Amino acid sequence: MMAPASRRGASEAEGLRRLRVAERRRLSRLLHDEAGPALCAAGLAAEMLRGTIPEPTREQQELLGRLERALDAAVETVRLLSQEASPDLAARRGVAGALETLARAFGAGLRIEGAPPDLPAEGAAALCELVRDALLAAGGGEAEITLSAGCARMRAAGLADAGVLAALEAAARAAGLRFLSQASPEAVIIEIHPGGTR
Amino acid sequence: MYTILLFDDHQIVRDGLRALLEASGEFQVVGEAETGGQAVAAAARTRPHLVVMDLSLPGMDGIEATVELLRESPQSKVVILSMYDDEASVVQAMRSGARGFVIKKASRADLLAALRTVARGGTYLSPEVSDKFLECVRKGDFRRRNSPVLSALTPRELQVMRLIAEGKTSKEIAAVLDLSLETVRGYRKALMRKLSVNNVAGLTQIAIAEGLARPAGRGVGV
């Protein structure tokens, strides 16, 4: 039986988690629905502008080309950020697809060794959220994710914060996943397995 | 000259598309729409050769609008223009009857290539999504809209579930579907009972996982 203080703490943590999810959903939607289309429209306008200059100078051509490339790159970034920020990424793309998106967004390496762990939708979403949180916590440090049938493993140079590791472990436990971490001088390795104890 | 109907809820995008299509000299824009209802009505009226349709729209989404529109104007060919590039969106779009799927970009070359190909009777997928689509077909693992999980739901329940997944309140859903608030509440309870979930987050997860709703998009996002 959970003590009242613990119950209150768990309820507050759940409330904060829900707020965080709502904020990410809002951000993802704004990127997708507003920033993306606006950049696309700007790109189309830049192409139209090119058509209005009958004989562009070399400098004008170069400037327009630079503008178009910059807008194309910005659209791609917005698309990736919109997907990565979405709390529904795993539901949409499955575990392997979601981790592929996260790896691209955070510049991490990804190796897929066979089929991903067999998890229900909630577990799959929690696993991807844990990997995302770990990537965030690792900051700019190099990270390497390996996905296999048994677990998702991540090796990251910047993931040495004991508080963060404890929070990840608690989140994994709450989601019914098993979380292991192991520190070495160069990096921390975390593993997320199906079948933990809530 | 091929006639085109533009369907996107962003005026700025429609303006850009209209300008570039008309400048090409190959296409004539015969109508614009920003809601599914407007698009279906405009297609029935103008019978365009081509329809350029956004996937993520308020109310009726691009998939539903494609099905409705092709019922009204079967000779029209739909090209989906989308910010999404995931496998499920492409599969759903092609299954709904679309003939092309183009990723929204800041350049026009892909769109013009798609429209030319589809107008001549072909099918076009942006290079960014064609590999993913083929991989889905190869593995046969793409999600089915008529999934066993959703098969117990009535068409009206599916509509309500999609709107819930979009983040709409019962009051908003009642307004969109022209139902009473109590009726919508009844549908919510029935959905939760049938799908064995006890909150909106659970319904949303199922809606996305089963391909009924897409994450993060206007109108269809959750």
Image (spheres, coloured by chain):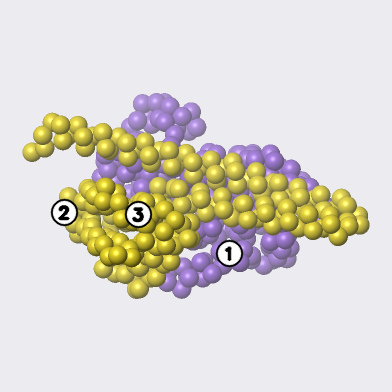
> Residue at 54% across / 58% down in the picture?
B85
**What subunit carries mark 2?**
A
For disc 3, the marked residue is: A134
Residue B97 visible in the shown view: yes
Q: Residues within 10 Å of mark 2 (few under 14, many from 20)?
A: few
Label 2 sits on what residue type? Answer: Thr
Residue A185 appears at what percent x and percent y? 30, 65
> Residue at 44% across / 34% down in the picture?
B168
CB under 8 Å between callouts 2 and 1? Answer: no
Q: Mark 2, mark 1: which one is toward the viewer?
A: 2
> Residue at 44% across / 48% down in the picture?
A86
Image colour for chain A is: yellow
For disc 2, the marked residue is: A197
State the residue in front, B180 or B218: B218
Image colour for chain B is: purple
For disc 1, the marked residue is: B128
Whether labels 2 and 3 share one chain: yes
Residue at the extreme left of the image, as rendered: A1
State the residue in front, B44 or A113: A113
